[in-house]
Structure formats: C-alpha cells, structure tokens
Image (tube, grey):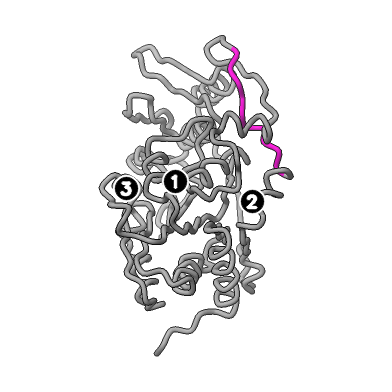
Amino acid sequence: MQFKPRDYQERLSSQAAKILNTTKIVALVFEVRTGKTITSFLTADKVGAKSVLFITKKKVIISETILNDYHLVNPSFELMQINYESVHKINAADYDLIILDESHNLGAFPKPSKRTKQIKQIVGNKKLILLSGTITPESFSQIYHQFWISEFTPFIEKSFYKWAKNYVNVTKKKINGFDVNDYSKANENLITQVISKHVISFTQSQAGFVSKVNEHVLTVPMKQVTYDLVKKIEKDKVFEGANGGVILADTPVKMMQKVHQLYSGTIKLEDGTATTIDTSKAEFIKKRFKGLKIGIFYKYKQELKLL
C-alpha cells in the first residue's frame, strides 16, 4: 500500500518548505510521536533536495527508525545518515540539504563545541532543517549556536558574546571562589520575535492524540551522601573527591546533567570515568517490582550498569 502522510504532516511540510525556500532554515519543534522525521523528509522532497545528510545519535541509527521512515516516504532524494561523532568524515560538497536531529544538542554556550564547529563547516549555505522536541530545554541562550551553524542565521551577531549583549541579562556566579559571567538568563520574548519566522511547533494534542497516561510518582529516599553532593555541587559548581576525581557543573546544562546523574545513583567525572555513588534507587526498583515485567528508562551508561 502506498504511504499516505497524515493531513497535518502534509500541511506542515508544505509550510516548512515555503519557509525553507525563503529563509534557508526551518526548525520543526514537534512533540514525540507526531512524526517530525517524516515531516522533514516530506519537506526536503518539496524543496527539490537531491542529496540529504541526516545527522543524529548513534543509537537512533542502530534502531533503523530513520531508514524505515525514509523508505516509507520514498522521496526522490538520496539519503545519508550519520551520527554526531562521525561528522568530521563528511564531505560537505556531497549534500544540498542538512537535517539535524535533536538540534538542541548543539546549544552549548557561551562557546560552541568542537562538534558544533564541524557541523557549521558542513552546513554553510545549504538548506537546513532543525528537529527537536524541545529546542531550548534549559535556557533560550541555547538557541544561538543552533542557528549560528548556518550562513543564513537570523542573528546578525557573529559571536555568542556579541549576541549576549543584545539578548541576555548577563549576571555573575561563583565558581571555585571566582566571579564568572552567567549567560543563561536570555530574553525569551526578544529571541522569539527573531526566530518565529523559522519555527513550526506542533503538539500531540494538535495531532489528535487522545490516549491518557496515568502517572504514579514513587519517591525514593537516597543516602545522605547523595543529598550532600547535590547541595555541594549546586553551591560551588564543582566538587573534588579524596581520590582526585572532579565533578564539574559550571553551566546550566552540566548542572542539570550532574544532578540527574547523582539522583539516579551514578556520576561521570571530568576525566571521563564513571562511578556508582548510591544504589538506593536500583534497590527500590528491585524490591518494589519483584516478579513483575517492567520497562526501565535510563539515560547514562553507568546508570545501566547500576540497574
């Protein structure tokens, strides 16, 4: 049977194609299960793309969901999918349109990561589709580098620091006893005015999802060492253990990651090693759901080892 897009996918891809032809950049900010990948393929097809590079996470490539959607849509362009860790292997001249999955991963600030700089070299003046469920998960300052990778960014400022003078309320915070600039308090309204012409947002509710999820929150008491570590990290932004291991949380993104890790019972140190701090959560799951078949979502490798 020939694939037939959902009505909203057809409509939104036409809208996205118009934006892409006009501005060269479109951001599809769709909630999960609404089909942002399929919509991006429909969009690329409608703008006449011939060779598309899809950059995503390694685990997504392994799952083959991207290829499945590609074959389902059966567009006229050729597709190359690659993970973020391998972008340095890409010949930018081979592609006329770039799709960036989970684009918020490029939102580090104030300095762009090495990976973001590499992707900027690939994107250049090509058409760009950004995909994300939440394009600014921690701060609107994360938006700058997601558009900066394109020559057609709507921001005229050539660096984050110049951009911050116009869009961020820069404050001070202490790290290791020193005052440093905090660039996380961006002006959401002002930024939205600039990027709104590039962004299409879509929710599950708009897609007609009617299923109801019944949530039951179970609170797990952790060991005191976990609470002490979190308190220390939130206050000082850094912690050095007796064995020399360092936990650094000097940005809002890192702070979120480190607190998340600690409350899951594990932590990744600055030297790349990871260790288990607290087994309380895993022990609770084992006892509470003994004999039952369940699924457990985890985020970090050490967390999987713990579980």
Query: Residue drawn 57% across and 61% down?
Result: 30
Which of the two discs, 3 and 1, labels the residue nearer the N terminus? Answer: 3
Which of the two discs, 1 and 2, labels the residue nearer the N terminus? Answer: 2
Q: Is residue 288 above or below residue 235?
A: below
86 left or right of 198?
left
**Segment tinted magenta in the rendering:** 179-188
* Residue that sits furthest to the left in the current view: 89
- Indicate yes or no whether the magenta region holds residue 182: yes
Relative image position of residue 185 (x, y in whole percent) = 67, 32
Residue placed most toward the observer, 277 or 175: 175
- Indicate yes or no whether the magenta region holds residue 88: no
Q: Mark 3 is on which residue type?
A: Val
* Residues packed near mark 3 inside 10 Å, few (<14), some (14 to 19) or many (20 plus): some
Instruction: Please identify the quarter of the rendering in which residue 117 is found.
Output: top left
Relative image position of residue 296 (x, y in whole percent) = 43, 52
Q: Which element is circle 2 on? A: helix
Which of the two discs, 2 and 3, labels the residue nearer the N terminus? Answer: 3
Q: Which element is circle 3 on? A: helix
Residue bearing the label numbered 3: 87
Residue bearing the label numbered 1: 287
Q: Mark 1 is on which residue type?
A: Lys
86 left or right of 139?
left
Residue placed most toward the observer, 13 or 38: 13
* Residue that sits furthest to the bottom in the current view: 1
Relative image position of residue 138 (x, y in whole percent) = 59, 40
| Inter-mark Cα distance, 3 to 1 | 44 Å
Query: Residue drawn 58% across and 22% down?
Result: 231
Residue bearing the label numbered 2: 195
Query: Residue drawn 51% across and 80% down?
Result: 5
* Nearer mark to the viewer, of 3 and 1: 3
